[in-house]
Image: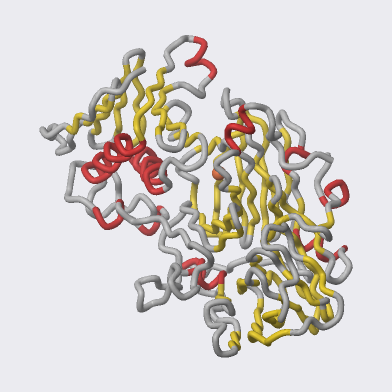
């Protein structure tokens, strides 16, 4: 039987494909590589790599401890490289308007009830529940892909991350 | 064009297959081929790719936008009703005025396609399977494979693995790890939950879940953020349809490699090849159609915006066909 090797990528190794144009503009494909984006990002920067109207997928370079964040809607965090610990907290007072879009940073330590924690490695997907707070920790540089809505600190730098020619 | 009732042929031909009629379209199959006729033309195509394409169309409820079975036959989803067309997205058929399109209520075309699959898929053929994992689609009629052709598409309400949502996969539940993913880590995340928060503190091995997928080219909803849907899928060999989306769609290649052939959505003229390796992220604009080639079984994250307003916004020019400009 053939022995298959599944190729994943990460901060310490990725190969990039690309758009090979026949009659088109490569910019139409908004082509980037999430590990290249994470390599060049500052810790905890939320860099959009995909956007569809108000929705985004963000790449986050997880390194050290993030600030606490509050989210008005469910977000989903996929660890795509390394290991990340996610602390979850039920805040005493609501910190976000449920109709708002995107999570926001919370200054300091929010008061509330600890909900638990998740230790996630490459390939694991975690729910960051609506109305709650979360904080992420990573001992070694790791990468998170966040499914969310464009928020106040989403970073858009398409021209720097995408194939142009 | 108005619709006429479905006619499910009840007399099998000499190969054992029944003919089917839907409005002005007539479908027949023999040992090797499917023959489609309509008032202005005819088309012949190999049975295997035809059945694989029709299977995706049915399983996805006609999906977003256009599902081209090949350069001639396909469907266009209007959500509630569906166009069945021949040559509609083929520049030469259009010029020659050989193209034809008829609109049907969703349930009517779905019932017809389901009946065709039930009759034309033989016992040892699974249209969802990779080529090396299934028997042949060809030859005289030998039994049926109802279990395979009536699989329901998995669609989580919030996230797979939550209580009251779509379950995780295991050997016990009939989802062994696929032969191409035997090297994928199956360890689960460590989830420590305080009492009372069991419905909210949740995580699972997403790559492990995908390694147990028993189908190819069949995106299923795994997590839902308002109208944003993560629809991962495992891919091997060729996407059986050429998808012309009615909105922007995104791909994030999670493992291995897929090569996409991209053509103009209306005319079918070639526009680009998009080569995606692990970690690559790319948009498929709303004015193209695409077909993927995956040399090894790979994990692909398809990311969709399920907003019902999008196709009309794009048609009215209020939403651009590309997601961002820079
Ligand atoms: Fe597609």
**Quarter location, residue B268:** top right
Relative to A99, say whether A110 is above or below: below
Quadrant location, the N terminus of chain B = top left
Relative to A138, say whether A46 is above or below: above
Q: Could you tell me residue B26's position as x and y percent?
A: 27, 25
Can the viewer see residue B221 in this picture?
A: yes
Can the viewer see residue B178 in this picture?
A: no
Relative placement, left or right, of A54 versus B165 is right
Relative placement, left or right, of A57 versus B154 is right
Extreme left residue here?
A: B11
**Quarter location, residue B54:** top left
Relative to B47, say whether B302 is above or below: below
Q: Which residue is pictured at 62% across the width and 62% down the height?
A: B255
**Quarter location, residue B202:** bottom right
- The total number of labels drawn is 0
Q: Could you tell me residue B289's position as x and y percent?
A: 58, 35
Relative to B110, say whether B200 is above or below: below
Extreme top residue here?
A: B96
Q: Which residue is pictured at 63% across the width and 66% down the height?
A: A74
Relative placement, left or right, of B290 versus B108 is right
Extreme front residue here?
A: A93
Protein image colouring: secondary structure
Relative placement, left or right, of A27 versus B171 is right
Question: Closer to the camera, B314 or A129?
Answer: A129
Q: Could you tell me residue B262's position as x and y percent?
A: 62, 36
Question: Closer to the camera, A40 or A98?
Answer: A98
Q: Could you tell me residue B251's position as x and y percent?
A: 63, 51
Q: Which residue is pictured at 72% across the width and 52% down the height?
A: A50
Q: Quadrant of ligand 1?
A: top right
Question: Closer to the camera, B316 or B128?
Answer: B316
């Amino acid at each position: 039987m053939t022995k298959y090797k599944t190729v994943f990528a990460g901060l310490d190794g990725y190969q990039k494909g690309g758009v090979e144009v026949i009659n088109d503009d490569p910019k139409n494909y908004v082509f980037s590589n999430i590990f290249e984006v994470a390599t060049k990002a500052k810790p905890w920067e939320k860099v959009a790599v995909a956007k569809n109207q108000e929705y985004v997928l963000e790449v986050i370079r997880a390194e050290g401890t993030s600030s606490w964040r509050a989210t008005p809607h469910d977000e989903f965090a996929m660890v795509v490289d390394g290991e990340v610990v996610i602390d979850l907290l039920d805040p005493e007072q609501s910190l976000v308007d449920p109709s708002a879009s995107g999570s926001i940073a919370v200054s300091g330590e929010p008061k509330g009830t600890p909900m638990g924690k998740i230790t996630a490695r490459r390939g694991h997907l975690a729910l960051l529940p609506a109305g709650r707070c979360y904080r992420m920790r990573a001992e070694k540089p790791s990468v998170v892909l966040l499914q969310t809505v464009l928020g106040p600190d989403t970073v858009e730098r398409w021209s720097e991350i995408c194939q142009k020619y | 064009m108005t619709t006429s009732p479905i006619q499910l042929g009840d007399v099998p031909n000499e190969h054992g297959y029944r003919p089917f009629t839907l409005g002005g379209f007539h479908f027949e199959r023999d040992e090797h081929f499917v023959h489609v006729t309509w008032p202005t033309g005819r088309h012949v195509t190999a049975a295997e790719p035809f059945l694989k394409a029709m299977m995706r169309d049915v399983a996805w409820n006609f999906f977003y936008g256009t599902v081209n079975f090949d350069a001639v036959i396909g469907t266009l989803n209007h959500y509630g009703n569906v166009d069945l067309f021949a040559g509609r997205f083929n520049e030469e058929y259009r010029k020659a005025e050989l193209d034809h399109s008829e609109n049907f209520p969703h349930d009517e075309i779905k019932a017809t396609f389901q009946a065709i699959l039930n009759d034309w898929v033989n016992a040892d053929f699974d249209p969802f399977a990779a080529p090396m994992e299934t028997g042949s689609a060809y030859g005289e009629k030998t039994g049926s494979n109802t279990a395979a052709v009536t699989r329901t598409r998995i669609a989580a309400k919030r996230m797979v693995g939550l209580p009251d949502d779509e379950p995780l996969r295991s050997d016990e539940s009939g989802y062994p790890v696929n032969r191409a993913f035997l090297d994928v880590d199956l360890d689960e995340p460590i989830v420590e939950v305080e009492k009372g928060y069991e419905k909210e503190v949740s995580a699972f091995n997403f790559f492990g879940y995908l390694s147990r997928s028993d189908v190819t080219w069949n995106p299923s909803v795994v997590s839902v953020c308002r109208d944003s849907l993560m629809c991962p899928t495992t891919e091997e060999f060729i996407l059986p349809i050429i998808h012309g989306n009615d909105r922007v769609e995104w791909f994030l290649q999670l493992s291995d490699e897929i090569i996409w052939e991209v053509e103009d959505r209306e005319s079918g003229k070639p526009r680009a090849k998009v080569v995606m390796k692990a970690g690559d992220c790319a948009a498929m604009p709303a004015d193209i159609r695409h077909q993927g080639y995956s040399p090894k079984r790979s994990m692909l994250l398809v990311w969709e915006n399920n907003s019902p307003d999008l196709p009309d916004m794009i048609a009215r020019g209020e939403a651009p066909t590309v997601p961002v400009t820079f």
